[in-house]
Amino acid sequence: MKIGVSSYSFDRLLRDSRCGYREIIRLAQKIGFAGIEFIDLANPAWGIEGNEIALAREARSAADEYGLAVLAYTVSADFLSDDPEREIERICRKIDVAKILGAPLLRHDASFHLRNLPGYTWEDGIAEMAPRIRRVTEYAASVGIRTCTENHGFVYQSPERVKRLIDAVGHPNYGWLVDIGNFSIVDCDNPAAVKVAAPYAVHVHAKDFLLLPAPAAGEPIPDGFNRSPGGNLWRGTIPGRGNVDVAACLETLKNAGYDGWVSLEFEGTEDLLPALSEGYAFLTDCLF
């Protein structure tokens, strides 16, 4: 396995300094990462606006300059939107951007919600989304890009639901971006969840959380923590410092035959660049 980093890990730096992609690529290479993945390139919150294709060319040029592989392009999606044809077309155009970016993989969401219809279930959502996602991955395959969905977004975040979705799409070009940490957010045991996900893995996010049990009624939530559906608390931290057994999860993936990229995705509150350096060192110790 090789170690990369998500541009999302630099969120605070991008927001506060408006430094742009070239600078975070330089910093990623300096820390030691061998690759970088990008989320939606035009992001006004980061001071990055403009034509997405032009931004893709610029990001790819900077990655080439610093010798970093471009690992993936990560975009938002909603395959339960009120205009599914428009959403399918939009994501296919994101695949075109990924091609220009030089990313071999496009990760898109499934949906963050269910339809507000009587008796509508997550299984109904899968039945509705699967043929739409299949059309997207068929287009991606025609231009040499794989697609995947991450366990992300509460509704389709547990291992059983994501597995059901991938099986329903039923296309060899479509797989799973396995986010090791995100299983915690829906109260799942991380190593057990990764065991379910491993046969479908096409990319991996290494993420860690500080986890606390559900507080008693009326007890305040500590700063920075969020509630899971089961009422438990979580907050991002540096891989190796939290309660997620990241090393065991990586070992499970390795034993299942996964030999692709592992991207550090950091969303903790610690000082950013030292945190990324520490996270890189921890992942290096786990993998090599």
Image: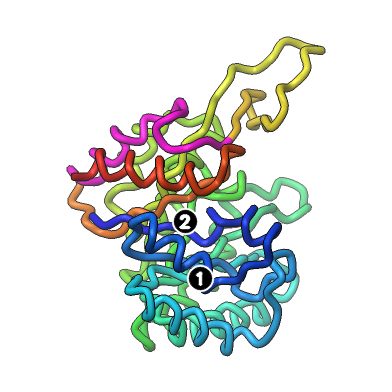
User: What residue is disc 2 on?
Assistant: 165
- Identified at 57% across, 41% down, the residue is 271
Q: Amino acid at mark 1?
A: Ile
| Quadrant, the C terminus | top left
Mark 1: few, some, or many residues within 10 Å (few <14, many ≥20)?
many
| Foreground of the two, 126 or 93 | 93
For mark 2, does the 10 Å Cα neighbourhood hold few (<14), some (14 to 19), or many (20 or more) residues?
many
Q: Nearer the viewer, residue 158 or 214?
A: 214
Give the x, y percent position of residue 19: 62, 67
Q: Position of residue 213 (x, y in %)?
A: 59, 17
Residue 156 sits inside the magenta stretch: no
**Image height check: is 270 above or below 261?**
above
Q: What's the residue at 66%, 54% (across, down)? A: 112
Does residue 270 appear left or right of residue 276 in this picture?
Answer: right
Residue receiving disc 1: 133
Left or right: residue 148 versus residue 69 is right
The answer to whether marks 1 and 2 mark residues whose Cβ atoms lie closer than 8 Å is yes
234 lies left or right of 193: right
Secondary structure beneath dot 2 equals helix
Q: Secondary structure at mark 1?
A: helix
**Residue span colored magenta:** 236-255
- Residue drawn 26% across and 59% down? 260
Name the kind of residue labelled 2 in the image.
Leu
Question: In the picture shown, does residue 17 fall above or below 171?
Answer: above
